[in-house]
């Protein structure tokens, strides 16, 4: 007798009640079917013009269906129409940016070295470019039902690279996932691609089956350290290991100098409150640890932060499991010796949570001990203000931090200008750089601009690779180089032909062409 | 009572006799010391001008000591002065090429996006470049005591990136390793760097300790599937996993079409014999499987191959363990049903091996079975000629192959020109591309030119990553991006300053500067 398929429910986090059954969890056979369909879509997706059109069409269809998409996402995530409208705009912008990238083809990294029979040994003709790896597994994030989920950056960059995708939906937004997948599949058929170019599966075990599938060639993941590490380990343990680009977790430390606090404590308190409570504290770049000075200036910051956080309305987390984890997490942290809670974070109403923050003497964080819990990410609207007495204590805490997506520095005016005579600004910037993939000065880490110079990644556990998951270079994760040696012109792919029929940017004999 | 340190002997493979005790195996404490010294060398190595000078000085010192280096390497590896002279030239060329790369700085991949307050949301100023990961572990290869060992491509590319290196010496050439390390350290002190910028350890356990060391941030490896996979697994199992760029093993298939054999069977037989016996068959790109047609043309190729291989003198393998593995490996393969040995490979004299080759009907390789052994690399002067009856059989064998460093295609003239009316040339090229990182047409895979368009890598197990270990882009393996957001000009590293004081190539607001 076959086991009944496990139902996948869409749940309203505002009430904890199931809304509708959206799907069933995928069996191993269904995962296999999705992967094989993706594998079969490689050939039609190999045409860059086709995938450019596909990505643009996907963006258009998502925009057209915007109202329905936002409604579905809000009903499942409680992120609110305002935030979701912005996230949809970011998502379609991203799809179009990757379409432009696919059209441009610079990421093919074409390099041609002509034969040189005069060298010892003689050099053959070598022509190299990058080709897609093959089907990619994408693990959707809880906290971005669009921009880091089915139609998100991992999917868009993989498709732009020429890799079909199978997404493992996040259980917090299965209906939104199904809706977006349907739109992407319609965009595929509208542009002459098979539907299988974008697969979707639900279920924890399906996610494990997916990363182990022999035809899957790489994976992208956004989520927790625990879940991400388990999948990373599965990817590495395969008979044929595959690249696993995971964004796992980040504390996102902030250092506020005495001078910065002295000059603008009120502004810093308000800014920090806004950043840590944005999206109910559910951003991967939420500032989770703030090194603030002891003394009067730091006290003013604390007062401003207290006022601003106290004014924050209770919010709904993405699901009740997260709500429980948040409530437990902040309670356990608040019970540590010398930890105080000027604004107590925790349960709000039956389904909500209240924002708050904890304080601790930085000295408690300079050596191993129970306070190390404060150096672990706590998902939700809470941050930890660690009060330091001098620069040495800042350095001692920073030395104990794991890798991060971001590190932030709040400097006084003279420190920023390098005119304070201490070199503190440069020293702190140098101290934060090894800790993170993005260093923010006199701002807040929330808000990750999609731009060519962006980097969203960082030392482990922030990410499991040295690549970025945001911005154009994210496409590089899904490609591998291949060099053709002494290949007759008639057989060369058009990308590598001498006359450059596709007008690609190239490096010829070591020099950028046209440069 | 402390255990006595295990001695490390230099052994003469021509006699199997120990030559001298070179060192002792490193204890965990000694590995730790070497890694800490490398870690401490990061700051002085951060100056690109210094590391440029260092790499050039290293090349000069190696050239100056060339006679001694070649003598040491020949005594331990029996590769012969001719080959080793060429390898030394390749090694110093490589060091100078990476010095040029370090001086140029294009690999820093500088990208600047100016703030755009008009966007929604407003875009901050973002400036990104790549920074060195930190100390790198390099595992030296048996078969290239110079070019893929202490002063080889992994070391040179890591140093060019700004990463200090600790090399785990290969037990086949400990004296050469010590000599080269001493020269590199002298180059370091000559150019103002600490000796610790280049560490050297001996011993199997030291190699494991090295990849597990918390301060090691990445690893490069050239060697066997078994050894490489064990270290890859150790790297992935760390609390903080690190990138492991391993080159593990490769069969390097060759397809000879009926037309190619018909037009130049004699030339192909002689060329194949030369390629598979080069360096006593100890190249990672040795052609290990040749798909040749049944029938008269293929018979001519076989005859030519037989003649050429029969004329090959017995040779000395790198060590006696490899000799035993070769003798066992070819015997086991030769005993398989339907396998014949027109020239029997195996033991030559007491310390030598004879080259040879096996034939098998390709039909034996199209389904799983004991003949799969023929699809595994056999290190040494042997290849397997698989005789096929039609294109479908070629495709069926190719579909069963693991990843490779190279794949080679021998075409008839009309096939190469695409004028034979069958499209066979393009179809075979497309069929070989997924199998390898370099596709060679009408040539042989041995000989890996150091050039910008080169790619030495391929699908697993050829390599464990999508990067190359030869050519300029090998430097990318040791870097990670970091983006600075809204950072005051006075604090920016010079690489990211608006006025570009270092004259670096950059992409500004999405466009290559000057383009």
Image (cartoon, coloured by chain):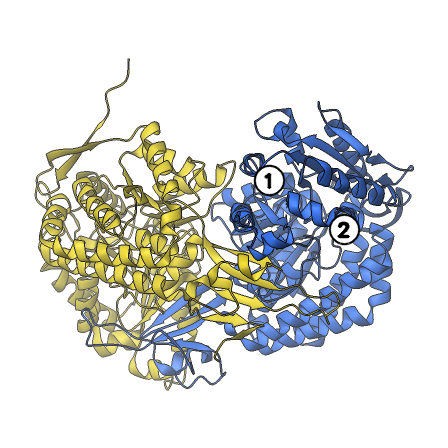
Chain colours: A blue, B yellow
Disc 1 to disc 2, C-alpha distance: 41 Å
Image quarter of the C terminus of chain A: bottom left
Q: Position of residue A313 (x, y in %)?
A: 89, 45
Q: Which mark is residue A365?
A: none
Q: Position of residue A84 (x, y in %)?
A: 81, 59
Left or right: where B251 falls relative to A352: left
**Quadrant the N terminus of chain A occupies:** top right
As drawn, is A290 to the left or to the right of B93? right
Decide which of B38, A202 is in the foreground and name it.
Answer: B38
Q: Counting residues from the N terminus, which is met first, the one under dot 1 or under dot 2?
A: 1
Q: Is residue B296 above or below residue A137?
A: below
Indicate the secondary structure of the residue bearing disc 2.
Answer: helix
Q: For the residue labelled by badge 1, is the local secondary structure a helix, a strand or a loop?
A: helix
In the picture of the structure, the residue carrying the numbered disc 1 is: A230
Q: Is residue A327 above or below residue A178?
A: above
Labels 1, 2: one chain: yes
Residue drawn at point x = 24 percent, y = 59 percent = B56
Q: Residue furthest top?
A: B1
User: Circle 2: is it few (<14), some (14-19), or many (20+) Cα within 10 Å?
Assistant: some
Which residue corresponds to the image point at 62% horizontal and 66% vertical from the top-left?
Answer: A451
Expressed as whole percent of the image width and height from the top left, the position of residue B460 reads: 42, 53
Report which quarter residue B234 is drawn in: top left
Left of A202 or right of it: where is B305? Answer: left
Q: Quadrant of residue A383?
A: top right
Q: Please name whichever residue, A127 or A387, is drawn nearer the observer in this view of the structure.
A: A387
Q: Is residue A27 visible?
A: no
Q: How many marks?
A: 2
User: Where's residue B313, x and y in %?
Assistant: 8, 55
Which quarter of the figure has residue A228?
A: top right
Q: Is residue B352 above or below residue B92?
A: above
* Label 1, residues with CA under 10 Å away: few <14, some 14-19, many ≥20: few
**Which residue bears the numbered disc 2?**
A267
């Amino acid at each position: 007798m076959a086991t009944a398929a496990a139902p996948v429910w869409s749940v309203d986090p505002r009430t904890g009640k199931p809304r509708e059954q959206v799907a069933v969890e995928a069996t191993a056979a269904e995962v296999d079917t999705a992967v094989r369909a993706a594998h079969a879509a490689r050939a039609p997706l190999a045409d860059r013009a086709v995938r450019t059109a596909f990505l643009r069409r996907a963006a258009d269809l998502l925009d057209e269906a915007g109202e329905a998409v936002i409604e579905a996402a809000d009903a499942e995530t409680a992120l609110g129409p305002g935030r979701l409208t912005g996230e949809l705009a970011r998502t379609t912008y991203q799809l179009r940016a990757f379409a432009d990238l696919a059209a441009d083809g610079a990421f093919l990294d074409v390099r041609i070295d002509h034969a040189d029979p005069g060298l010892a040994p003689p050099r053959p003709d070598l022509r190299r470019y990058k080709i897609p790896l093959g089907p990619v597994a994408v693990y959707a994030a809880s906290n971005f039902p669009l921009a880091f989920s089915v139609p998100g950056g991992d999917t868009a960059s993989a498709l732009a690279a020429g890799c079909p995708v199978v997404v493992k939906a996040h259980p917090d937004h299965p209906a939104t996932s199904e809706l977006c997948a349907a739109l992407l599949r319609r965009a595929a058929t509208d542009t002459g691609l098979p539907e299988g170019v974008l697969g979707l599966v639900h279920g924890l075990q399906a996610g494990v089956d997916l990363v182990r599938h022999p035809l899957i060639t790489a994976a992208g993941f956004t989520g927790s350290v625990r879940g991400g590490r388990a999948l990373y380990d599965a990817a590495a343990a395969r008979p044929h290991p595959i690249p696993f680009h995971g964004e796992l977790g980040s504390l996102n430390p902030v250092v506020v100098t005495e001078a910065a606090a002295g000059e603008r404590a009120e502004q810093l308190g308000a800014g920090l409150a806004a950043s840590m409570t944005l999206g109910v504290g559910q951003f991967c770049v939420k500032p989770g640890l703030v090194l603030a000075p002891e003394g009067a200036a730091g006290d003013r910051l604390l007062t401003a932060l207290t006022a601003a956080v106290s004014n924050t309305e209770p919010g709904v987390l993405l699901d009740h499991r997260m709500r429980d984890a948040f409530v437990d997490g902040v309670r356990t942290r608040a019970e540590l010796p010398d930890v105080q809670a000027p604004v107590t974070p925790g349960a709000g109403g039956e389904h909500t949570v209240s924002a708050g923050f904890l304080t601790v003497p930085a000295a408690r964080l300079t050596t191993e001990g129970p306070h190390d819990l404060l150096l672990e990410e706590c998902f939700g609207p809470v941050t930890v203000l660690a009060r330091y007495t001098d620069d040495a204590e800042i350095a001692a805490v920073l030395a104990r931090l794991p890798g991060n997506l971001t590190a932030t520095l709040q400097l006084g005016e003279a420190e920023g200008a390098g005119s304070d005579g201490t070199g503190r600004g440069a020293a702190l910037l140098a101290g934060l750089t090894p800790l993170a993939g993005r260093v923010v000065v006199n701002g807040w880490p929330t808000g990750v601009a999609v731009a060519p110079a962006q980097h969203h990644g960082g030392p482990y556990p922030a990410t499991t690779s040295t690549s970025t998951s945001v911005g154009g270079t994210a496409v590089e994760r899904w490609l591998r180089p291949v060099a053709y040696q002494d290949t007759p012109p008639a057989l060369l792919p058009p990308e590598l032909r001498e006359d450059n029929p596709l007008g690609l940017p190239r490096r010829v004999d070591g020099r950028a062409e046209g440069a």
